[in-house]
Amino acid sequence: MRVYFDIICRTVANHRTRWLAISLGFVVLYYVGLLLFTMLRFGEIPNYAIFHDVFGVYRLIFDGTPALSDALPIMLDEAWFEAGYKNPHYYGIATWSYMLIPPKVLLVFLTGVLVATVLVLAAAGKEAACPTSPLPAYATAGMGTALVGLTSATLTWVVCCATPSWVVSLAMLGMSVSLALWLEPAGIILTPLGLSLIVSIIVKQLRGLAAASGGARLASAVT
């Protein structure tokens, strides 16, 4: 494990700018894409935006909820930013909204960090002439990224009870609302599965780089 940690630290240090750009860029592109997807789906531009006092809300929830086990799930679902479309023909009710929820943003950022690590390790493998099969690795990492991205979506739609959930995006894509809501509990399985797929590729890359590094040291010692 120490060898793997050293390889990651050295590789990230050698590709610092690329790693940071991918990690942060992933978050930006994800949320921009999520908003654009919603706008295109409904053909509407958001007509309101709100920055919520999330820490003030957390305090109210914590003070007003006797059981911490009940307070934490509520707090984790609170958004700090919300934008959407309020239909003037329905008393200003938001027919859809797009939210930024801190735990979900952190999850997306973690995914971006893992994706950036996969890419810089792949670059390090090319530099070390490490024999790899990048296409299957990228496909697996892409599948994991897609699973996490899907289950991290924080959209609401009045048809889906106007609550933020990843399955709202499925309903927006055309899946029946009843089926989408039935699939909602699967998110707690799909998210770890997606992260595990990306991590498995990183571990495979680290094994290859460790083997290549060991072979290089052996050749140097022999010569």
Image: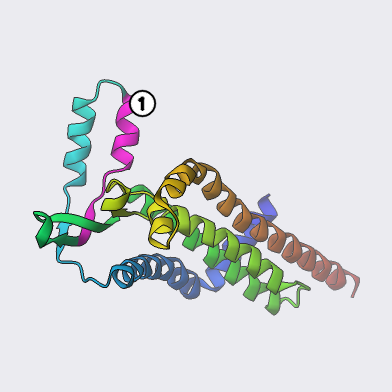
- Please, what secondary structure does the residue beneath circle 1 have? helix
Q: Residue at x 25, y 58 (%)?
A: 96
Q: Position of residue 148 (x, y in %)?
A: 50, 55
The answer to whether residue 110 is visible is: no
Q: Residue 126 versus residue 192: which sits nearer the camera?
A: 192
Q: Does 131 sit left or right of 115 as displayed?
A: right
Q: Is residue 172 magenta?
A: no
Is residue 70 among the parts visible in the rendering?
A: yes
Position of 96 compared to 69: left or right? left
Instruction: Please say if 69 is above or below 35.
Output: above
Residue under numbered circle 1: 69
Side of 83 where 172 appears, left or right: right
Q: Nearer the viewer, residue 119 or 38?
A: 38
Image quarter of residue 109? bottom left
The stretch in magenta equals: 68-84
Q: Position of residue 153 (x, y in %)?
A: 39, 56
Residue at image coords 32%, 66%? 38
Which quarter of the figure is the C terminus placed in? bottom right
Residue 128, image x and y in percent? 72, 76
